[in-house]
Image (tube, rainbow, N blue to C red):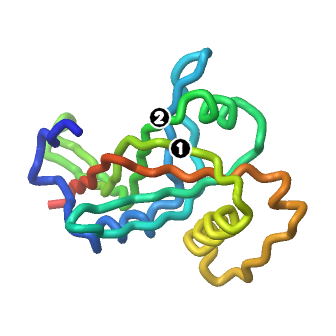
Amino acid sequence: MRPMRLFKREIKDEEILREILEECDVVRLGGFDEDGMFIVPVNYGYELENIGGKMHLRLYIHGAKEGRKAEAFAKNASVAVEMDCCHEVITGDYTCSYSYAYRSIMGNGRIHVLTEKEKQIHALTKIMEHLAPDAEIRFRPEMLERTAVFCIDVEDFTGKERKKK
């Protein structure tokens, strides 16, 4: 990935990256198909691991087995990811000195559909743990048959934070 221009805002701390993943509700996926580029917001589950000093991020999403998103990902597995949270206006002394506080994660990865039932259940469990940690988790077989479950291996990503002064 290209180095961050304002490197002082880059987040490398695993715990802060995990805080962002927990705080955000939606990841925006950028893809490409014969109609052009598109962005789709989706709920997600995740796994973040430190392997040999390098952070590895895996995102899980679900959706319909047909439609633009499913067709695009089947043809072109490259996706961009973006999530942001902790939004707050930073006021200034004059109009152009206003800004915005936030935390974000951006990156690129490869998406693939999960076909093995055990992997689908694992991914859907991660989604539920993130979105509704207190919910009872139970998947009906007919639901698993109708649902496409995807895994995104985020190959490169950065965290960024703009703090309020």
Horizontally, residue 31 falls left or right of residue 8, namely right
Tell me which label, 2 or 1, sits earlier in the chain: 2
* Residue at the image point whose x is 31% and y is 49% from the top: 157
The residue lying toward the viewer, choosing from 39 and 89, is 39
Count residues near mark 2 (Cα–Cα under 10 Å), then give few for <14, some for 14-19, many for 20+.
some
As measured in the structure, the alpha-carbon distance from the residue carrying label 2 to the one carrying label 1 is: 7 Å
Question: Is the C-beta separation of discs 2 and 1 under 8 Å?
Answer: no
* Residue at the image point whose x is 52% and y is 31% from the top: 31
The residue lying toward the viewer, choosing from 60 and 20, is 60
Name the residue tied to disc 1. 111
Work out whether 156 lies above or below 17: above
Q: Where in the figure is residue 15, as x and y percent of width and height? A: 28, 74
Amino acid type, residue under disc 1 in the picture: Ile
Amino acid type, residue under disc 2 in the picture: Ser
Horizontally, residue 116 falls left or right of residue 102, namely right
The residue lying toward the viewer, choosing from 70 and 25, is 70
Q: Where in the figure is residue 162, as x and y percent of width and height? A: 22, 54
Q: Where in the figure is residue 122, as x and y percent of width and height? A: 63, 69
Name the residue tied to disc 2. 78
> Which quadrant would the N terminus be assigned to in this image?
top left
* Residue at the image point whose x is 81% and y is 60% from the top: 144
Q: Where in the figure is residue 3, as x and y percent of width and height? A: 15, 40
* Residue at the image point whose x is 40% and y is 50% from the top: 154
Total numbered circles: 2
